[in-house]
Image (cartoon, rainbow, N blue to C red):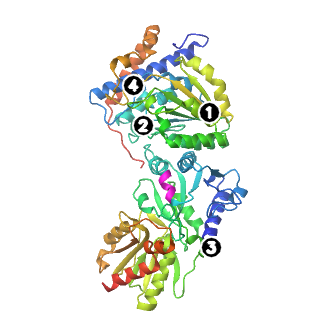
Amino acid sequence: MLPALVDAPDQVRADRAAMLLIRHFETALLDLFARGELSGTTHTCLGQEHVPVAVSGLLGPDDHVLSNHRGHGHYLARFDDPEGLLAEIMGRAGAVCHGVGGSQHIHRPGYLSTGVQGESLPVAAGLALHLRRHRPGALACVYIGDGSWGEGAVYEALNLAALWHLPLLVVVEHNGIAQSTPTGQAMAGTVAGRAAAFGLAHTRITGTDPAAIRAGLAPLVARVRAGEPLIAEFHVPRLGPHSKGDDTRPAEQVAALPDWYPALAAAAPELDRAQRDRVARVVADVSARPPAEWTDR
Amino acid sequence: MRVADNINAALHSVLAGDERAYLIGEDLLDPYGGAFKVARGLSTRFPDRVLSTPISESAMTGVAAGLALAGDTAIVEYMFADFLTLGFDPLVNFAAKSVTMYGTRLPMRLIVRCPSGGGRGYGPTHSQTLTKHLIGVPGLAVFEMSPFRDAAEVFAEMLALAQPCVFVEDKILYTRRMHAVPHPFTASVRDGVAYVGTGEPPDLVLVAPGGTAGRAVAALHRLLIEDEIAGLLVVPSRLYPVSLDLPPVPHVVVAEDGTAGGTWGAEVAQHVHARHFADLAAPVTLVHAAGAVIPAAPHLEREVLVTAGTIYDAMVRTVRG
């Protein structure tokens, strides 16, 4: 389902613009890698762009976001700063974290990502505890994947969140595959069953229209702010490799996955072109910058 | 005042003086007050800021890191230092790294307190000293409780660093009296390091963390009485990074709990060799526990752990060559 032009055209345009920005940003990264212009590793969120776009629209300035290894979309949906993110990934001047953190370790006020699976959930619980006392009504939103559920820290943190009534929103991007391992080989039971075991609210989302997603989530997120944690499980495709060139799935299986992009590009060709061009300009600009410097150690 | 009461008083003063300070750990609530009673009275006085957690070392350490990132002061009590292995990821991989891995130094007021060491017959998984595993981690400092320094002062030093610190607390030390040294020794403190000696120029320096201080003083006392060798005990509160300024002596011995191999003592030896090589008559001698798990039965445990006798023997061997 596309972001529909209903009663808030500015919001719809913003949602579409954000989804397209993330898509073109991630595509550009894979292209840069293929040309040997990026070092290290990166994990793109192709196919999952609508999740942070939908969720970010429900967050306020006091809310805290915790992201993971596949976090470019989380960052771009929150800050619309492709220059700072690309500079971080390329280790160039203007990098959000001066090139130290790279793709998986980004920090700005109200935002933090870390690359170890499950590590962020207890940290999010701590931030939620802080917010409850100092910013009542604010929440901590933590993005995890289906693979993260293999980690014990996830369960320790969910137990605390339920016991302590923390304003914690857990967004699960369930893309059906953890690196190369299908979820069916890694997870017994379900995310919903895990939520039920802790007495936590759970909702399952399959659509890709941010406005519709927000409409469904808004009342649940309002309850999070009052101390009722929520696990929002998005079923999404992973259209790209885990990192780069390491997809072991047959090409026809990947090609058969649903993708919001062709329909949106057809419905909003000018916006699509504008965002593609914007990313191209960012790539040209950042590529020409000098190396990042790490001074405040 | 007993050492446990001194740490308890220090915790009271941190929580009373800083309204953003938390104590987090297992079984902290009164009347229990923690497995070694060091948290006694705190949950009654600060009910909103003493958080008794489930048996979840990973989560309690991660929660503390989250609070510290938000600008709060977080003190974590581990029930046994052995369980640090369960909180290693949030401590080493996240909290310590967060100070610098985001490109700009982030202040993190986080102290992890861990009851360490043997001597109580708790057996192989409840008696270890894990200091060696915490050495050389960027962003992580290691301190140890000593009977010669008020814990409140050491807490203030750790919090002023604004980076995660591990605070090692020896379990036997908890019941010992603060500042007690036998005649003719006296203790003094300079720049965060305690010195215990007779006031005479020493023939030997014994470097030891606070937890071994009682055994170290007993060994030095015997060395003075039986062998007429004057030793100076040096007890730094901050174990790592190592920074020691020793008087010129021909012999230096380092005694610590924990097995040999990649140890704090080896770090001290390297430091002393680099700074005081010209004064030394022999390489620094290291004293460690035997290379074995720590047995439960008292007679077997004594065979493995560092005792006053082990330290005395090492000092005599070092001086006599």
Q: Closer to the camera: disc 1 or disc 3?
A: 1
Q: Which residues are magenta?
A: B82-86
Q: Are marks 4 and 2 on the same chain?
A: yes
Q: Closer to the camera: disc 2 or disc 1?
A: 1
Q: Position of residue B36 (x, y in %)?
A: 61, 64
The quadrant holding residue A197 is: top right
Query: Mark 2: which secondary structure?
Result: helix
State yes or no: discs 4 and 1 in contact (Cβ < 8 Å): no
Q: Position of residue A78 (x, y in %)?
A: 52, 29
Q: For the N terminus of chain B, give its image quadrant.
A: bottom right
Q: Is residue A245 left or right of residue A145?
A: left
Which residue is labeled 1 in the image?
A196
Which mark is first along the chain, 1 or 2? 2
Q: CA distance from mark 2 to mark 1?
A: 31 Å
Q: CA distance from mark 1 to mark 3?
A: 48 Å
Q: Are marks 2 and 3 on the same chain?
A: no
- In the orientation shown, which residue stands out farthest toward the top? A267
Residue A142, above or below B33? above
Which residue is labeled 4 in the image?
A26
Q: CA distance from mark 2 to mark 3?
A: 47 Å
Which residue is labeled 2 in the image?
A104
Q: Residues within 10 Å of mark 2 (few under 14, many from 20)?
A: many
Residue B142, above or below B273? above
